[in-house]
Every structure is written in structure tokens, then in C-alpha cells.
Image (cartoon, rainbow, N blue to C red):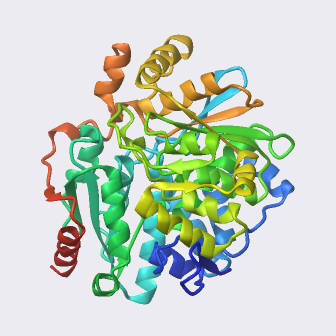
Amino acid sequence: MRYVSTRGQAPSVGFVDAVLGGLAPDGGLYVPETWPQISPDEIAGFSDMAYADVAARVIGAFADGEIAPADLTQMCCDAYATFTHAAVAPMTQLYPGVFMAELFHGPSLAFKDVAMQILARLYDHLLGAQRRTQTILCATSGDTGGAAVEAFRGRKNVKVVALFPEGRISEVQRRFMTTAVEANVACVAVKGSFDDCQAIVKQAFQDKNLRQAVDLSGVNSINFARIAAQAVYYFTTAAALGAPARKVSFCVPSGNFGDAFAGYVAHRMGLPVGRILVATNSNDILARTFETGRYTRGKVHPTMSPAMDIQSASNFERLYFEGVGREPVETARAFNAFAESGTIEVPPQAFAGMRELFRGVSVSEVDTGASIVATLRETGELIDPHTAVAVAGLRSAGGLDSPVVVMSTAHAAKFPEAVAEACGVTPELPRGVEGLASRAERFDRLPAEAETIKAYVQAFAEA
């Protein structure tokens, strides 16, 4: 299977090169030339399979033989053995017809672990075979950085630089990054927003000299392997609820659109999906897009759900590419213009296609807090602010046929202050990470200047 850039000015590559490359050299995102299919009988059989085996099947469909099936299965087994729940992504019923997928049982207590743990093992396997080292540069709105550091710390073939917006993530989120002691990890507090961090990463990838000097790669959801790995829990949760005999809908708290796009990928692979409701906080670029057809960047507002404080959702480019009939010239034109003007008018036919699967809803801070309280009172479940956005969004949107799966993307203990302020209950860190608050932190502070950060990355990589 070959992978092409959404902007059409880069040569097609295989799965291995798409994984290790991250972002395409023309600034576009890699997508498979064709969507692999999983049969209804296979989907039905997923309900009786271990999560690691389902992951090996789904990710293997994209690897298409470039990785030996036995090797991929072992990597998946090793990756998901790090989770504290045997089911990896277990479900809890919240209300009649409404279920919550708990995606926070990994090492950093967030859904990013589901993809990052397997991605680290893919990198180890592929780089080791090539006797090669790489530098990973990632931007995080809170959880990606912690998951990346947990997954890659101490690995001999990779150095990691994690950028995070200073003062705009929770202390627990920050500490999952900054308390790492391994020499292959560097963390940088950027004096700006997550969108600033993300823009700097994209500029770094478009700097050919830097890419070559440090063998740059990325593990944000710009990396298609992340999307493939996240598609797995759409299959497992849907199969547990009766798919493919019936459709299942999903409600996804979203910032960078990677998690919700993974649902689209599962749908294109053959999973019968009813709707995907994209729930945002007041940083509502995605909610507005799916309701109006106008993708317009706004000012980033700090909220109690900081991983969603984003006004430029990078994975939307992949959906736009599909919506305009996989026309790379149009996709490049639109996103180059967005970089300048901050607006894309989604063509009517593309918007109609998006609306067949996606809806959008924005949730206020007041309603987010009220959702934490109501969910605890009505179900006994203490949820984090991002999950609360999804639950509140589902309540207000209505119109989704059941069953509906709410993606719970983080443990409440990652946001203890926000949760306690909302409901008066302070969530405790699970066993194994309870000493996080007492560990020393190690990070640098830099301005939101691309050249400064690129020089930092090169110096760290060459040290």
C-alpha cells in the first residue's frame, strides 16, 4: 500500500516511510491511496478477541506486509501490556443507550497512550532494522507530550523534544513530561498557545536542512500511524455493542481532530457508524465548521479542558482532502490560503459529504462544570473536563440514534483543580503515578519563535 500527500507535491511512500517521516515534505499529511477493508464477519469476531489482536489486524491492514505479522502482533502485545485494565479500552454504561469508552488506562492516563505505546515500538523496530536514529519533535496541548515522553523515554534510537504552551496545561499534564530524567528527552515551555507550538513544528518539518541534519520525525496526529492505532478502539467498542449488525454512533471531545478522524477511518474501512458528534469547548472551530461549512480560525481561549484549546485542527486537512474528491491542488490551495487568511469556505458538495457523518456542538465552561456534577450525581462516575464536554455536547445536541459511545479521553486526576472546583471532589492519582507531584521537573523556556526553537532542536539532537 502506498501513501500520498494531501497536497500532492511529494512522492508516494510505503507505510514505513510514512510512519518515520510523519509530515510529508510538501507540508501535507499522508493518507493511504486506498482504504483497506475489514469484512463484516471479521468485525463481528472482534468482540471475542483481545485488544492487542484487534490492533494487529487493523494496523496490519495499513502496514500491508511491510512489517511481519508476527512482529506486529508482538509489538501490540507489548504495547498494551502497559495498560492497567486488561480490556485496554473498557466501557461503562452511563445512561440507557449511552456508553463511555475509558481510554485513560495507559501510563500517562490519557487516550494518547493507546497510539503512542505502539508507535514507540514501531519506531524501535523500524529504526533498529535500519541502524538509524531520529529526532522526534512534537507539539502538545497537554496529553500528547506526556504520552510521547512516557513511550519514548530511554529508547536508544530516538530523541524527543516536546513543546507545550506555558501556563496553558494542567500541572499533572506538565509533570508527565517534565519529570522524565532520561537524557533522550527535552521539554520546552513555549510562551504562546498550542497553535503557536503546532505552527512551529510544521515550519520545522518544512526546513529541509533541519530535517536532514537531525532526521526529524513527528508523533503528533499528523503521523498516520497514530490515526490507524486510534481507529482500533472504534472497532472494539462498536463490536461489543453489536456491530456490524447495527450502527453505533460516537461522541468525541475534539481539539486537533485526530481522534474523531480515526472514527472516519474506521467507517471507511467498513465499520457501520451512525454519526460522529464532534464536541468542542469555546475554541469551537470544528463545531462551527460542521454546522456552517466555514472553517475559520478564532482567538484561543484558555479553558478547563486545555487539550482542546485549539483553533487550527491539523487533521481537518485529511477530511477536506477526502471531501473534495482527493484533489491535492485544491487542498493545497485551501490550506495555504488558511495559513494567510485564517478561513476556508468548504465547497458545498464537500460540506454535504461531511454532514452525512459529522455533526458539531460547542459547550460552554458553565455547562462543562455542570456536566461533571450531573454525571457524578446520576452515574457515580467522576469524569475529566474533556469527557464532560462530550457528555454535555451529547445532551444538548440530541438526534443521535443509540447506542452512542462517548470517548473518555483522560483520567479525572489529570485535572484535579478543575474537577474539584466543579463538583467538590478531588480525584486521586491511580497507584503507580501517585508520586508524580514530588518529582523534580526539568524543562526550558523559549519564545514562540520558529528559528529559536529550530536551533534548540538541532543543538539537542547533536549533543
Q: Residue at x 37, y 60 (%)?
A: 151
- Determine whether, in the image, residue 325 is placed left or right of residue 298: right
Which residue occupies the foreground of this view, 395 or 85?
395
Q: Position of residue 380 (x, y in %)?
A: 51, 16
- Determine whether, in the image, residue 288 is placed left or right of residue 186: right
**Is residue 322 visible to us here?**
yes
Where is residue 205, by image quadrant? bottom left
Q: How many marks?
A: 0
- The answer to whether 58 is drawn above or below residue 363 in the figure is below
Q: Position of residue 453 (x, y in %)?
A: 21, 68
Q: Position of residue 339 (x, y in %)?
A: 43, 63
Q: Position of residue 181 (x, y in %)?
A: 18, 58
Where the C terminus falls, by quadrant?
Answer: bottom left
Q: Residue at x 22, y 38 (%)?
A: 435
Q: Residue at x 47, y 20 (%)?
A: 367
Q: Residue at x 51, y 41 (%)?
A: 85
Where is residue 204, by image quadrant? bottom left
**Is residue 82 visible to us here?**
no
Where the N terminus falls, by quadrant?
Answer: bottom right
- The answer to whether 345 is drawn above or below residue 24 in the figure is above
- The answer to whether 19 is drawn above or below residue 430 in the figure is below
- Determine whether, in the image, residue 187 is placed left or right of residue 421: left
- Determine whether, in the image, residue 96 is placed left or right of residue 281: right
